[in-house]
Amino acid sequence: MTTHLTRRTMLSLTAAAATLPFAGRSQAADKVTLRLSTPASDTDQRAVALVQKFGPAVSSFATFEPHWNATLFKQGSELEAIARGNLEMAITSAQELAVFMPEFSIFAAGYVHQSAAHQVKVFQDPLMDPFKKKVEDELGVKLLSVMYLGRRQLNLRKPKSELTVMKPEDLKGVTLRMPGTDAWQFLGRALGANPVPMAFTEIYTGLQTGAIDAQDNPLPTVVDAKFYEVTKQVCMTSHLVDLNYLAMSKKVFDKLGAEQQAALQKAADDTADFGRQNQLKKEDELVAFLKGKGLDVYEPDLAAFRSHVQKAFLSSDLAAAWPKGLVDKINALGA
Ligand code: KDO
């Protein structure tokens, strides 16, 4: 599932897409069809928010057609699909964008974002403008809103009695599934584990068969994807306050009238807000749920994880691509 496209290929793809006829608009109803592809399931809070808020809010001029569980495009190939003119919308990530624009890895680095509110402040701050512009210019993708995925935690097959994870050293030799891009794999190594790439839709079976020892995701995902059925513990590292971006083809967006564009932007922001509130509530409630299912849920030595992960990122090749002074600017927007 690793994306092999280079930035140069992307530039030629967007140029080719610009010459295609406008494929998304159905002539009969004169409504634009907005197909969204994501690995998320239909019960994920981002999906619920999109169906309840986004679809209805744009229905006077657009038909929103979501495809869940990576059934339309596989995880990690959505940006390419939009750039080629084959898809209108996706839920993408900083890690996926970093494949094409390495500086995006700053938003994928462990212990950088501090909270859901901090993510919103960063996304709305002028510091994001050059990032957003580059994505539009080079991929033909418009980042509409920032969606809250949640605090990522370590979720392991072995019970705590067999493996207690207090420090990064305790993860030595643990095969940790991470999504397939470099920024993700780096995070897995920075945590002290042995990361392996695997698509989201394969995690459950990977845990069930023992192909992997662990996976990381926020608690709502652990529950939504039923990973608790095939794991025995959650170590609450909160190593990444994870975000996704609601993304759209810029070409499709630009074809809309000014009022429609404003309505669509508001719909995206309302959707992200609604999903964020629901996700935060779930994160709070689900510790009890998971304990009720028999899992050990506990906090490790957070200071040890934070310093290990931060040190790894700051001295990495990834950080070499970060604009100078940006970490300080991001920190200044935090609590
Ligand atoms: C995952 O593959 O672990 C991940 O959580 C990565 C996110 O960026 C996002 O793609 C998410 O999966 C999917 O939306 C499924 O929840």
Image (cartoon, grey):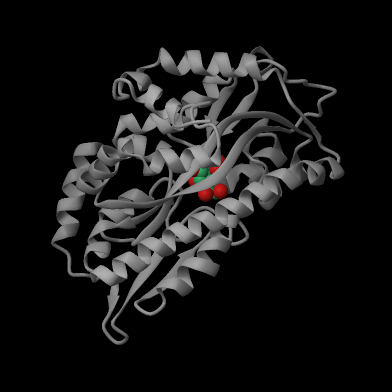
Name which residue lies at 36% across and 20% down: 319
Q: In which quarter of the image is residue 182?
A: top left
Q: Where is residue 165 in the image (x, y as percent from the top left)?
A: 72, 20
- The residue nearer to you, when weighing 241 against 3, is 241
Residue 192 image point, x, y percent: 59, 17
Can the viewer see residue 250 in this picture?
Answer: yes
Placement of 269 over or under 315, stated as above or below: below
Left or right, residue 219 beside residue 321: right
Residue drawn 56% across and 14% down?
307
Q: In this view, does 127 lie above or below 71?
A: above
Q: Does 209 appear above or below 109?
A: below
Direction bottom: furthest residue = 28
Q: In this view, does 81 lie to the left or right of 48?
A: left
Tally of marks: 0
Left/right placement of residue 295 relative to residue 147 reads: right
**Residue 132 place in picture, x, y as percent:** 29, 44
Camera-side residue of 205 and 63: 63
Rendered residue at 67%/42% (across/down): 219
| Drawn side of residue 61 relative to residue 64, left or right | left
Nearest to the observer: residue 170 or residue 208: 170
Q: Can residue 71 be seen in this view?
A: no
Q: Is residue 223 above or below residue 302?
A: below
Give residue 149's position: percent from left, percent from top: 55, 45
